[in-house]
Every structure is written in C-alpha cells, then in structure tokens.
Image (cartoon, grey):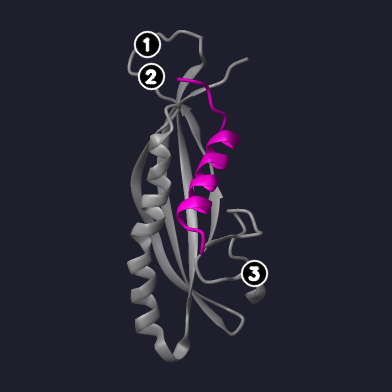
C-alpha cells in the first residue's frame, strides 16, 4: 500500500467522478464557496470536493513510520441540482434519485489498492434561491483510510 496526501485523494475522487459521471460538472468554485451567489456559477449536476480533515487512525498505541502514518481523511462533496419553480416537486425528486450515482462513483475509488473508502452519509439537503434560480444542494461525507506520506 502506497502513501497518499490529501491532494492525491482529492485527485483520485475527482478522476472517478469524471469517469463514472461524465455528464456532471466540477464547479469552478472551491468546496467552501460552492455554489456561491452567482447564478451563472450554478449548473445542474454540478459538484465540488473538499478534504477538510486528516487525522491519525491507529488502533494500537504504536505505529511504524514507514511507509507513512495510517490516517483517516474526510472527503466532503457538495452537489447542486437545478429546481424549476414550475416543476419543483419533480425536480427535487429527480435530485434525490441521482444521489446514489454520485455515491457509487466515489466508491469506485475502492478499487484503488492505496485507499479504502467508506460512505458516512448525506449531511444535508436543502434548497437555496440564488438570484432567480433555485437549487437543491446535497452534501455528502466519506472517509478514506490511507497511509499519509511523512517524508
């Protein structure tokens, strides 16, 4: 098992989403600012990724330094789905039906021998008006077990 930094994990999740969800778009905004306040920055089936926390994950009091420190890194995703005012119930239901697609795409990284991905849950679902547009925002949380490089 090789070592992976938080940036490596983000890249691998990003690659999996690009392969398994080619019709979805990565936001041009970072996770903390997505979706922002600009309606032009919102797209249907748009997502942003964040890796906010990396913590040691050892079950014993001792651990070898090589190949690195066993860690648990949180991976947060936020996805947006457009909601038309004239078809709000239909569009909200469509957004909910698409949730498993994003989860399955991230779990595809489990095939990577350097990391172990676990779906922790959906942490929020809410609608937001941005300008004249309405969007459904869904936040997902995963955690990844991996060795963090120390050298």
Q: Quadrant of residue 11?
A: top right
Horizontal and vertical percent position of residue 91: 40, 79
Left or right: residue 59 versus residue 53 is left
Q: How many marks?
A: 3
Horizontal and vertical percent position of residue 126: 42, 69
Tell me which segment is drawn in magenta.
1-23
Where is 12 relative to 59, above or below?
Answer: below
Left or right: residue 19 versus residue 33 is left
Q: Nearer the viewer, mark 1 or mark 2?
A: 2
Where is 54 relative to 29, above or below?
Answer: above
- The secondary element bearing badge 2 is classed as loop
Q: Nearer the viewer, residue 28 or 18?
A: 18
Residue at x-position 38% and y-position 52% = 103
Q: Which residue bears the numbered disc 1?
A: 61
- The secondary element bearing badge 1 is classed as loop
Q: Which residue bears the numbered disc 3?
A: 41
Q: Nearer the viewer, residue 131 or 42?
A: 42
Marks 1 and 3, the one that precedes in the sequence? 3
Q: Spatial distance from mark 3 to mark 2, Cα to Cα?
A: 41 Å
Q: Nearer the viewer, mark 3 or mark 2?
A: 3
Q: Which residue bears the numbered disc 2?
A: 58
- The quarter in which the N terminus is drawn is top left
């Amino acid at each position: 098992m090789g070592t992976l930094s938080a940036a490596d994990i983000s890249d691998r999740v990003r690659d999996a989403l690009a392969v398994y969800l080619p019709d979805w778009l990565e936001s041009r905004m970072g996770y903390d600012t997505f979706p922002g306040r600009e309606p032009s920055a919102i797209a249907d089936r748009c997502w942003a990724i964040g890796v906010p926390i990396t913590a040691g994950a050892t079950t014993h009091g001792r651990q070898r330094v090589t190949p690195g420190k066993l860690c648990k890194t949180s991976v947060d995703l936020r996805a947006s789905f457009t909601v038309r005012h004239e078809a709000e119930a239909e569009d909200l239901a469509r957004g909910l039906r698409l949730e498993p697609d994003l989860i399955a795409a991230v779990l595809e990284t489990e095939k990577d021998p350097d990391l172990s991905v676990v779906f922790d849950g959906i942490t929020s679902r809410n609608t937001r008006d941005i300008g004249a547009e309405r969007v459904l925002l869904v936040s997902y949380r995963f955690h990844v077990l991996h060795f963090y490089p120390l050298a």
